[in-house]
Amino acid sequence: MTDQELASGLKADLAVVEELIHDSIDSEAPLLREASQHLIDAGGKRYRPMLTLLAARFGNPDDPDVLRAAAACELVHAAALCHDDVLDGAPLRRGRSSVNARWSDAVAILTGDFLFAQAFLLLAAVPQQEARLEVNTFVRLVTGQIREMTGPADGEDPTDYYVTMVSDKTASLLRACVRLGALTSGAGETTVRALEEYGDAFGVAFQISDDLLDLFGEEERSGKRQGTDLLQGAPTLPVLYALSGTGEDSERLRALLGPLPGAQRRTALTAQERAEATELLRRHPAVDRTRERLDAYIARARAALAPLAEGPARDTLEALCAGVAHRAG
């Protein structure tokens, strides 16, 4: 971010958002408060509230509802992570023990429920009816998670299914972030629609880049251990392309992973099998196809910004697209 005025304003706003988040998790139940604090204090980039604050720059960013919306977005994200860790049996979250590992699955589920509820309480105080109805994002998040667990039906195209799943599981929240920022700042309808399109495309691109990080990312930089998605059986785009391919590498991957990842896997991968599958995928043409799909969604996100007023906020949203492309290598 090269514009110092924007950077300074975002930093000040994020500090207030952080206070709102901590105020929201101050439960009367000590265990609930401690578990929520543990998750929030693990940090994170606060990417989602930053998107909300950036979108608000196309309206009146000084409206207090903007800050409430930004805090709500981070709480929804934290709640979803808490539930994801239970589903994945994850022992770590952001380099420290996950809530489920430190306490129990039951505590983690209830903590996630609590964070969702606190997010919606923040949105309930927002006067714009459209903003209050953003609770529909929760429905899409859950739907996306279920889609990931169940996989496509017989005869359904796996890559089309992937885009639908990712649009719900990942892109829906990023779309909600920019939409809420625009709505609570009083931005015009054209701006709201443009930001919605940006959030949809950017969210899918973000997930595709995350899929590539599972194969090529450096843990020190990305915070993600290589092969995690393979170990968990996540239906990533490179895997789906590779499993649908021909040749010896695709045949071997189908033997390792099954015809589809996830629920259809025959057994859990051993460390040796995961290393072999990772190496097969890295050299597979599926990687080039995945990068092409990533580039297409990044281009779509950039094109969506065209109706927005020129300036530092728009430049930063465009720079985020470049950042997503760069993180994928």
Image (spheres, rainbow, N blue to C red):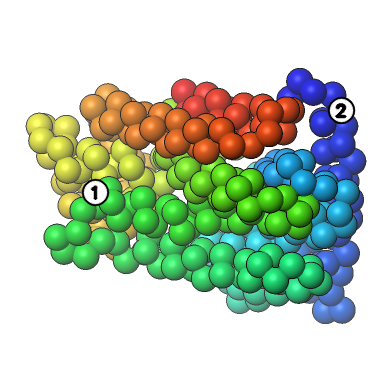
Image position, residue 162 (x, y; %): 33, 52
Q: In the figure, residue 38 lies in which quadrant?
A: bottom right
Indicate the amino acid at tag 2.
Glu
**Cα–Cα span, label 1 and label 2:** 50 Å
Q: Is residue 129 left or right of residue 303?
A: right
Q: Is residue 108 visible?
A: no
Element type at mark 2: helix
- The residue at the far left in this view is 247
151 sits to left or right of 93: left
Residue named by callout 1: 257
Residue drawn at point x = 15 percent, y = 38 percent: 245
**213 w.r.t. 167: above or below:** above
The residue drawn where x is 52% and y is 71% is 139
Decide: is 313 above or below 19.
Answer: above
- Residue 65: which quarter of the image? bottom right
Q: Quadrant of residue 29?
A: bottom right
Q: Which mark is residue 5?
A: 2
Which amino acid lies under the numbered mark 1 shown in the image of this protein?
Leu
Image point (73%, 28%), residue name:
311
Residue at the image position 17 percent from the left and 43 percent from the top:
244
Circle 2 residues within 10 Å: few <14, some 14–19, many ≥20: few
Mark 1, other Cα within 10 Å: few <14 / some 14–19 / many ≥20: many
Query: Would you say residue 135 is visible in this rendering?
Result: yes
Q: Is residue 103 above or below residue 64?
A: below
Which residue extends farthest bottom?
29
Q: The N terminus lies in which quarter of the figure?
A: top right
